[in-house]
Image (spheres, coloured by chain):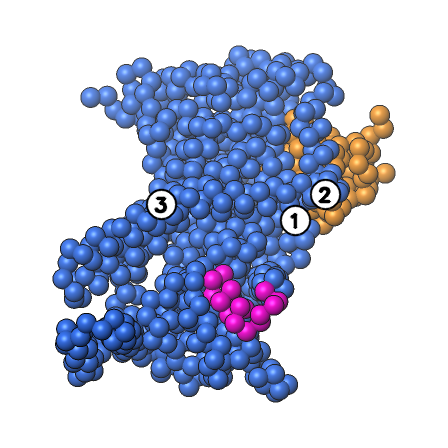
Amino acid sequence: MPQELFIALAGNPNAGKTTMFNAMTGARQHVGNYPGITVEKKEGHARAAGDLLHILDLPGTYSLTAYSQEELVARNVLVEDRPHAVVDVLNASALERNLYLAVQILELGSPLVLALNMMDEARDQGLAIDAERLSRLLGVPVVETVARQGTGVNEVLAAAARLARERKGSWTPLTISYGPDLDPVLEQMAARIEQEGFLTDRVPARWLALKYLEADEEIRVVGRKTGPLARELEDMAAGVAEHLHKTLNTYPEAVIADYRYGFISSLLRQGVLTRARDRERLAFSDNLDKVLTHRVAGPLLMFGVLFAVYQITFTLGQEPLSWVESLFGWLADATAAALPDGPLKSLLVSGVIDGVGGVFSFVPLIMIIFFLIAFLEDSGYMARVAYMLDRVFRIFGLHGCSVMPLIVSGGIAGGCAVPGVMASRTLRSPREKLATLLVAPFMTCGAKLPVFILLIAVFFPGSEAVALFATTVAAWAAALLVARLLRSTVISGPATPFVMELPPYRLPTLRGMCIHTWERTWQYMKKAGTVILAISILIWAAMTFPGPSAVDLARIDNQVAALQSQAANTADPAALARIAAEQGSLEAQRAELALRSSLAGKLGVALEGVTSLAGFEWRTNIALVGGVAAKEVIVSTLGTAYSLGEVDPENAAPLQARLGSDPAWSPLKAAALMLFILLYAPCFVTLVAIRSEAGSWKWAAFSLIFNTALAFSLAVAVYQGGRALGLG
Amino acid sequence: MPMSLRALAKGQRARIVTVSASAELGRRIRDMGLVPGAQIEVVGRAPLKDPVALRLAGFTLSLRNNEADFIAVEVLED
């Protein structure tokens, strides 16, 4: 049995690392998260000669500092897990910058293989790279690859396996000179570190000294816990920083970066890189950008693309969505027919099947949206969207990339916050991402629409289009203003630097997009089977128990029995019709009674004292509680609460008539209610999505409480303000 | 005479003289290869004039104007 070799894949974003990983591992991948954070962890297996390779795809990074979660994760894997070999995937066209990460890995000492990827593009751009010379100068294996076509992938695996066997886990750190100001102090620090054996079981002494000079916060925290030498090292670093500031007005980390780039430039000048034709580089991409980011045409095309993404998702998703719905509808009917009436049947049909079915109905939407997003990201267009919109979204403390999650969530009315929140993954700036996913649920999602359409039809007849448009505008205003508020309070902090690569346009590979789509969908389905099923059962229980008293039930049963015996004794069609109608109304009363005596119902009644400030009575309250399960439930729950029996949200004529003739309802109350529904707690599926994208239940709870409080305050303001003005 | 990167016009080429940003922004700027001596060309500006797109050796980069303020450059004549 050969030993399994552990190989880590490192590399810059946009260098083709994911394509390389896919080419190495095929479909045999496992995707999860690193514990406690939202950085994705992808693993897979591959074979090289007789060896089984366990391959870990590190997050794409430009460096190994401690500023982003991605960099920290990459660094910690290299230091703590000590892979048998590391493969650094380089974009050969931007060799200088890509080597910056490679040099840092070499300074750490990990056994390294360089994969010069996208060699075809580099050649097209007139670059000649002497891989053999680069290999000799750096002392590491270098393999030329085109991962998209699978060229060189096996050679990389073989080189990694060979290196892992040769090096047997030993590290050989590269030493670079950092000039007359830093070298002496680096040597002193390294000597002290060696002397004390300070963390030397984990990292090379010189590397550690370098991190102290770079003022690396994470290393300093670890150091302070390790021993008193930490103080001495920090003092030495502070001393040299002060000296540099006084004499050269610069920082140690700036000097370090300069020398590292200097090392790379001199390396490339030794015949590694020659540019044949200098001015023709990236000509295709540049020409495309002249149109796609043009001052006028650019934004117009962008809105076209965003609208198309939205249209394709929700029209193409319609058909499979209805299949999923009918499948679960059939399952519910079959189960209902097979089981006797009682709590078990209710649990299975209303709790499990409806709950899970509701969740699975999102699957087609999620598949389509992530397929399209994968296309936009892999093609390089998403970076342009961020580039064009950044100036606008920055005002609200967001990022140019925030636009996609907001639109998908319902920025164009009828979206869905579940894929919307999940789409916030495209944001690499943590604070901007959090703000985006917390405000995305304010948008007019497809499930809020039936409620709005119902209320608008009853209370604002004739101005349907205007009212619906006003709702969407209100949603955007709320999302952007709340984002601004959050970014200056709970998620305060300076804007994450925007500095971002605009990768050349490329045609994405179908295989890459399919793998990406499947990963997202599978993660979502796993959630549906666990957390979401559990919450769905809890909500069902809250809307079912404790239930009506035996006395009340017996009264209705007796009335039904009386009607049935009347029906048995008559053959008159008119009398039979009257009896059937009365029986229907009794069943509706029974449903209303069941709802009112449930936990949710009691909560709705108990809250009436407070909610009457916004004009909501207990029936509305119950419907709103039900709306946390799914917003479309609001209409049907309102129907049940008004003893109208089953109300189809698509055809709610009886409920419309009932609300229109009820003196307790007015256009003002409807407006306050619509505002509340627009802004209050997201449905629980969205809450679960927020939890997984934000990385903690804390933010899901925040969303639940804060959104409801905000929605309620605004609804009260509208209702009371309107009343003071004599509007209702 | 060094000038701010922000003041460069589209199509102008320049060499970076100093990068005065520190901490996270400084690190990000340097990680991307914007270090003294690097040659850049302004290839475009977003429709609202901000951010700016720069060409470096073999790739394109965008950064906000207020980030460009930390970078001093000298213009290269063709």
A721 or A388: nearer the viewer:
A721
Q: Is residue A421 left or right of residue A26?
A: right
Residue A655 has which mark?
none
> Which chain appears blue?
A
Q: Position of residue A231 (x, y in %)?
A: 48, 52
Instruction: Please give the name of the residue rendered at 57% of the width and 17% of the height, measured from the top-left corner.
Output: A120
Label 1 sits on a secondary structure element that is helix
Which class describes the residues within 10 Å of circle 3: few (<14), some (14-19), or many (20+)? Answer: few
Labelled pair 2, 1 in contact (Cβ < 8 Å): yes
Distance CA(mark 3)–CA(mark 1) = 39 Å
Residue A584 occupies which quadrant of the picture? bottom left
Residue A518's image quarter?
top left
Q: Which residue is found at the position 81% from the left and 39% from the top?
A: B8
Residue ID at (35%, 45%): A323
| Residues drawn in magenta | A448-464
Q: Is residue A567 shown in magenta?
A: no
Residue underneath mark 2? B46
Q: Which of the two marks, 2 or 3, is nearer to us in this view?
A: 3
Q: Identify residue for label 1.
A: A390
Tell me which chain the residue with mark 2 is part of: B
Image quadrant occupied by the C terminus of chain A: bottom right
Kind of element beneath mark 2: loop
Residue A323 tag number: 3
Residue A291 vs residue A486, the one in the foreground: A291
